[in-house]
Image: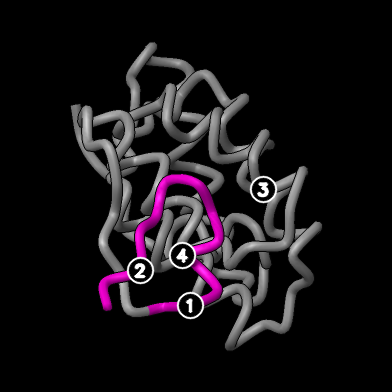
Amino acid sequence: MNAVDTNILVRFLTKDDAQQSSLVYTLFKRAERQGEALFVPIVVVLEMIWVLESAYGITRAGIIASINDLLSMPILTFETQPAMQKFIVSARKNDFDLSDLLLAHSAAHSHCQKVYTFDKKASKFSRFELLS
């Protein structure tokens, strides 16, 4: 199995560079033809959220929909796939920071009870605990 970097998924979603987008499309089609899965590390999803928000100004709803679409692609295998699915459900139900929600669900998947934080807003989410 091979993995993809953040920029691969960003090119696929934004199609902002025709040449690179075409290369990604070719990679995905080849993986599909060969029955190959491409691994998506959780850190790639975290970076992708940041890039889509900050560099592209994509709305929260747009980012959630994009991640959900990626999760449905058979050629992509996400690290902590169950946590990713719970993250999507959770993100649709509240307005906590997407990165914080991803962290919380990833930690829960790894059997952590809480995530300690100094972030007061994040600490209002049940999986966080404010360190004070």
Q: Earlier in the sequence, mark 1 or mark 2?
A: 1
Q: Which residue is disc 4 drawn over?
A: 123
Contact, mark 1 vs mark 2 (Cβ under 8 Å): yes
Cα separation between marks 3 and 1? 18 Å
Q: Earlier in the sequence, mark 4 or mark 2?
A: 4
Contact, mark 4 vs mark 2 (Cβ under 8 Å): yes
Residue at figure coordinates x 72%, y 62% from the top left: 95
Type of residue at label 4?
Answer: Ser
Type of residue at label 1?
Answer: Lys
| Left or right position of 12 against 131 | right
Q: Which mark is residue 91?
A: 3
Contact, mark 4 vs mark 1 (Cβ under 8 Å): yes
How dense is the environment of label 1, judged by Cα within 10 Å: few (below 14), some, or many (20 and up)?
A: few
Q: Residue furthest top?
A: 35
Cα separation between marks 4 and 2? 5 Å
Image spot of residue 20 (x, y percent): 50, 67
In this picture, which residue range is highlighted in magenta?
119-132
Image spot of residue 105 (x, y percent): 41, 40
How dense is the environment of label 2, judged by Cα within 10 Å: few (below 14), some, or many (20 and up)?
A: some
Q: Which circle, 2 or 3, is nearer the viewer?
A: 2
